[in-house]
Amino acid sequence: MLIPFSMKNCFQLLCNLKAPTAGFKNTVKSGLILQSISNDVYQNLAIEDWIHDHMKLEDKPVLFFWRNSPSVVIGRHQNPWQECNLNLMREESIKLARRRSGGGTVYHDMGNINMTFFTTKKKYDRMANLKLLVRALNAIQPQLDVQATKRYDLLLDGQFKISGTASKIGRTTAYHHCTLLCSTNRTLLSSLLKSPYQGIKSNATASIPSLVKNLLEKDPTLTCEVLMNAVAAEYAAYHQIDNQIHLINPTDETLFPGINNKAKELQTWEWIYGKTPKFSINTSFNVLDGQSHLEIRIFIDIKNGRIEVCNIEAPDHWLPLEICDKLNASFIGSKFCPIETTMLTNILHRTYSEDDELHSKWNILCEKIKGIM
């Protein structure tokens, strides 16, 4: 049963904060099942952080359901250029988010259920959570062949991944979150989670590609609502708590003081791209010069999302060495992103405002460079 959270009933349930906050009372005797009314990936990730940072979870576990509009979520230690097709994401207006837990990259949409299991650090147990999901699925469809793996995934029919796992373990609290593929857009998932960028060298955590399948493809009765209700019922029975899903608004500062600042931080360029582990790109491309093609080589070091070393090598007769050096120097310290590259190109145009041929070559070069960003 879904119950909207109000000021009257919400914080008589969400309680016992690590830091005192007006409106909360210490009345919770067991656990809670929550569901976000938002489909914004940054707001929902912020709620995870808020619960982890502020709620005492001793004997009061929390299960949090959330779904997002189309977005790609990378792990804390991953490289987005290595993990996804950023150009396609920009074209399709797909959001990119970096979560605070480890693990691999996932595609979210309204057909992919996210579940976060909050506990104390001592009671953190990913396999127990996954076995709970298996029991919930078998309760509504006993014929389903679903198994938890040693990698803490769920496999359907022994080969199709329907759930992936990531986690964050704090000093006293922890959470384990996982997905459950119900009716996600598998075509878009496949296209977005395939990096087209060549020549990347990085020590960032790499995702492991897997075959995936939607549960709705196996059984058309397994909708998101049916699945969430089944998991909630199994969770309530296991923890001996009320089987009630409480709806929460992750933008409500009255209920979650400071939540909007957490969401804003997750949207910053410095967090999404700037937290990428140091990496380099060594690649080349061809440009047309009359009837022939010329090779342009590019070597770039990126640290904290900014260009630390840039070496663009072009044939001297096509782009004079002096101009090439100026271009290399202009990139140092700039963000590794198309918008900043466009700004740099415009500045260089003004520096050599009378040279149309040079402008044309710069445009070609910068468009090629933006293609790898």
Image (tube, helix red, strand yellow):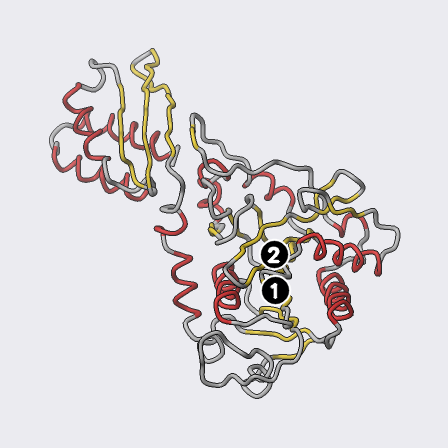
Badge 1 local density, few (<14 within 10 Å), some, or many (20+)? many
Q: Position of residue 227 (x, y in %)?
A: 74, 61
Residue at 51 percent of width and 83 percent of height: 24
Q: Which residue is mark 2?
A: 176
What is the quadrant of the N terminus in the image? Answer: bottom right
Which quadrant would residue 119 be assigned to in this image?
A: bottom right
In the drawing, does residue 282 fall left or right of residue 237? left
Badge 2 local density, few (<14 within 10 Å), some, or many (20+)? many
Q: Amino acid at mark 1?
A: Thr
Q: Residue furthest right?
A: 143
In the drawing, does residue 282 fall left or right of residue 308? right
Please tell me which of labels 1 and 2 falls first in the chain. 1
Q: Position of residue 127 (x, y in %)?
A: 70, 52
Q: Amino acid at mark 2?
A: His
Which quadrant would residue 325 be assigned to in this image?
A: top left
- Secondary structure under the numbered disc 1 in the rendered image: strand
Residue at 64 percent of width and 54 percent of height: 112
In the drawing, does residue 356 fall left or right of residue 210? left
**Is the residue under label 2 in contact with that under label 1 (CB below 8 Å)?**
yes
Please say if 234 is above or below 96: below
Of residues 210 and 358, which is closer to you in this image? 210
Q: Position of residue 23 (x, y in %)?
A: 49, 85
